[in-house]
Image: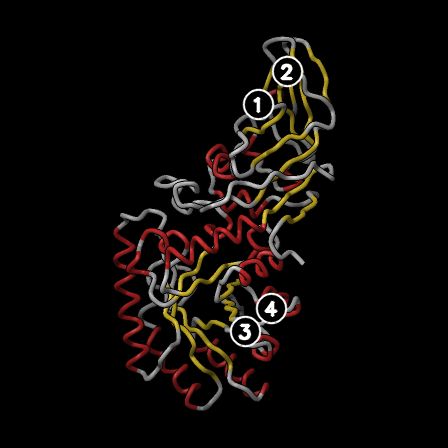
Amino acid sequence: MTPGPRDLPSPRARAEIVVDLDAIRSNVHTLKAAVAPAALMVVVKADGYGHGMVEVARTARDAGAEWLGVAVLDEALALRAAGDTGRLLCWLGVPGEDYLPAIEADVDVTAYSVAEVDEISAAAAEAGRAARLQLKVDTGLGRGGAVEADWPGVVRAAAEAERAGHVRVTGVWSHFACSDEPEHPANDQQEAAFTQAVKVAEAAGLAPEVRHLANSAAALTRPSARLDLVRCGLAAYGLSPVPQQQSSADLGLVPAMTARAQVAVVKQVPAGSGVSYGHTYVTDRETTLAVVPVGYGEGILRSASSRAELLVGGRTRRVAGRVCMDQLVVDVGDDPVSVGDTAVLFGPGAGGEPTAEDWAQACGTISYEIVTRIGGRFARSHVGGVAG
């Protein structure tokens, strides 16, 4: 049974992000049950999607995640420095990348090209041990990975490096472009292209431990794409990767992040008062304004101006006028709101507060951007789980 959101302690800071690690634990359990017998990778790049990379990684491991995933080598090495010893994949490098520390730390690294295979092989020779190497093929996203014409060459280079003892090819993988639209024809096309790419790798003598294609959306909506391993980022944090079809609650997921701040200023103003820069909001009556001390300096999207809502004084209220660098304003009418009261920007939603998905819809973006951008001068704390 999926637990409800935790009753959070009162704010201890001017503005804070509180991450419920028990929610992440529950989400990992839910995802593991949904994708079994495939293994689960929890993606913790970008500081755990804004939730705290090390804390999320510890919780995900404790909840049974067999793999962790990060984008860049610095993230992988930070996890190793924090004590993580499990399977860990890194996938984004640039020419001249120093692969030696990652090889020595047993990080699985990714190659998209013959040049990357050669760089990783050279680093492995220097380390005196085989690198754990995964190969990524571009099946239609048009981003990282070898295109179809280059794929046989990459596979041959990896097979030669494996025969020389410089690498052990542990995986072949790709990434969907449209899995958040389950009926999009590109999904079938990419899955077919990936199947063919794996055949090319096997024909060259490679026997990867894991084949993986599915991200959160595909893991939950496309069973045929689960293969040996799925990579779940957004869903592990309790946010729906297919919000137009299913909510977090529909999927049995609990959003883990709550963003909130103390009301800094409360003032009464007459009708006809302009609010914030440009006076894009003008009061239509005598009313009370509450100033919340967060803004785009904390990663609040300026497109939230006069669109997104907060929970203040027991009611949801729209941002009044433009979001500023350090603050935003809400019109609270005649309701008794005081300095020091809590304004909740978003959270799990069970207490009447908006969710990150609500903010995404209001701002014309996706929930990924809402949770990864927020930060700046917010203090971040963790409750539950295995934070330490």
Of badges 4 and 3, the one in the foreground is 4
Q: Which mark is residue 315?
A: 1
Tell me which residue sits at (59%, 85%) in the image. 127
Image coords of residue 355 (percent x, y): 51, 36
Q: Is residue 19 left or right of residue 357?
A: right
For marks 3 and 1, the one nearer the N-term is 3
Structural crowding at the residue carrying mark 3, measured as other residues with C-alpha within 10 Å and reported as few (<14), some (14–19) or many (≥20) = many
Q: CA distance from mark 3 to mark 1?
A: 48 Å
Image coords of residue 275 (percent x, y): 65, 20
Quickly name the residue at label 2.
335
Quick check: marks 1 and 2 in contact, CB under 8 Å? yes
Tell me which residue sits at (65%, 9%) in the image. 286
Q: Is residue 164 above or below residue 279?
A: below
Q: Which mark is residue 84?
A: 4
For marks 4 and 3, the one nearer the N-term is 4
Please state which amino acid type lies under the numbered disc 3: Val
Q: Which is nearer the eye, 142 or 363?
A: 363
Q: Which mark is residue 107?
A: 3
Number of numbered markers: 4
Structural crowding at the residue carrying mark 2, measured as other residues with C-alpha within 10 Å and reported as few (<14), some (14–19) or many (≥20) = few
Q: CA distance from mark 2 to mark 3?
A: 55 Å
Tell me which residue sits at (54%, 42%) in the image. 370
Colour treatment of the image: secondary structure
Tell me which residue sits at (55%, 62%) in the image. 62
Q: Is residue 383 left or right of residue 41?
A: right
Q: Secondary structure at mark 4?
A: loop
For marks 1 and 2, the one nearer the N-term is 1
